[in-house]
Image (spheres, grey):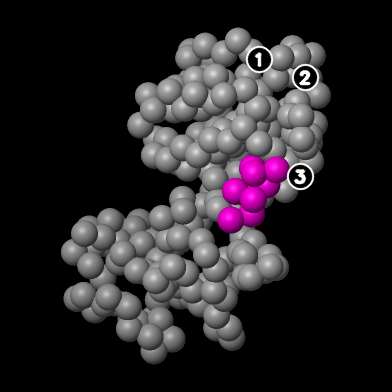
């Protein structure tokens, strides 16, 4: 998971960063003490989990919360125990941490995030992808495949192609089970495959390679669907 920590207290950021280093599922951590900087980070990147201080001096946690995509799980950080009840008014908030924070409580919050992401992945039927300064809604059932192209990713549909700064690595974590990575440059919609050959797939006359490192997982997925 890619994690963003937002807290104006550097000690809290460092503490949560240390806790994250103990969780195998958290691969990358970005931290900031500035609410305004966090807005730029959220606009430029996808995060699986955000630890968000509700009481920031430059911009409120509520304002930041409104900018976070629905697929991202949010754990609020607060000094106010009464916030626990209020926090559940927001779907994105899966848990809260009351200062001072200890590791056992942090670990339980991460477990809640994992449950949230597991359920969200199965239920998601669309994604919003960033194309320049706008967000484009993409119906996942209509996607043929995703392709990595240098610093961009192409979302290929029957009638169009959308370029976005998202990566395949971040995207595959959010996609339903009928998507499968078959190559370092391709994620395919299994429901859109026309033919499967020894080392390749054809979707709408486009030939997509199957690399050895993904071959076993791909065939296992095909067998599950047959």
Residue at (60% x, 44% y) in the render: 72
Alpha-carbon neighbours of circle 1 within 10 Å: few (<14), some, or many (≥20)? some
Give the residue number, with chain letter if any, for mark 1: 98
Residue 137 visible to an observer of this rendering: no
Residue at (66% x, 23% y) in the render: 77
Give the residue number, with chain letter if any, for mark 3: 66
Q: Indicate the position of residue 138 as horizontal and vertical percent values.
A: 63, 68
Q: Indicate the position of residue 90 as horizontal and vertical percent values.
A: 76, 35
Give the residue number, with chain letter if any, for mark 2: 83
Whether residue 134 is situated above or below residue 98 in the rendered picture: below
Residue at (71% x, 14% y) in the render: 79
Q: How many marks?
A: 3
Q: What are the residue bounds of the magenta stretch?
A: 36-44
- Dividing the picture into quadrants, the one containing residue 11 is top right
Residue at (73% x, 41% y) in the render: 64
- Dividing the picture into quadrants, the one containing residue 12 is top right
Work out whether residue 145 or residue 203 is closer to the camera in this orientation and state it. Answer: 145
Q: Indicate the position of residue 120 as horizontal and vertical percent values.
A: 58, 45
Whole-number angstrom distance, CA of label 2 to CA of label 3: 17 Å
Whole-number angstrom distance, CA of label 1 to CA of label 3: 21 Å
């Amino acid at each position: 998971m890619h994690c963003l920590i937002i807290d104006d207290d550097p000690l809290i950021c460092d503490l949560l960063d240390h806790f994250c280093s103990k969780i195998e599922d958290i691969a990358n951590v970005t931290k900031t003490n500035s609410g305004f900087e966090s807005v730029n980070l959220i606009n430029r990147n996808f995060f699986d989990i955000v630890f968000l201080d509700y009481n920031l001096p430059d911009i409120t946690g509520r304002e930041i919360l409104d900018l976070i995509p629905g697929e991202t799980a949010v754990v609020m950080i607060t000094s106010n125990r009464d916030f626990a009840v209020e926090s559940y008014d927001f779907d994105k908030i899966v848990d809260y941490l009351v200062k001072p924070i200890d590791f056992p409580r942090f670990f339980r919050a991460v477990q809640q995030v994992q449950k949230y992401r597991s359920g969200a992945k199965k239920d998601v039927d669309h994604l919003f992808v960033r194309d320049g300064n706008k967000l484009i809604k993409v119906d996942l059932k209509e996607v043929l495949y995703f392709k990595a192209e240098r610093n961009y990713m192409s979302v290929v549909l029957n009638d169009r192609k959308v370029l976005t700064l998202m990566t395949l690595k971040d995207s595959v974590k959010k996609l339903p089970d009928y998507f499968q990575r078959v190559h370092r440059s391709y994620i395919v919609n299994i429901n859109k495959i026309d033919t499967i050959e020894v080392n390749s797939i054809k979707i709408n006359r486009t030939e997509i390679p199957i690399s050895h490192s993904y071959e076993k997982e791909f065939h296992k997925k095909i067998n599950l669907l047959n």
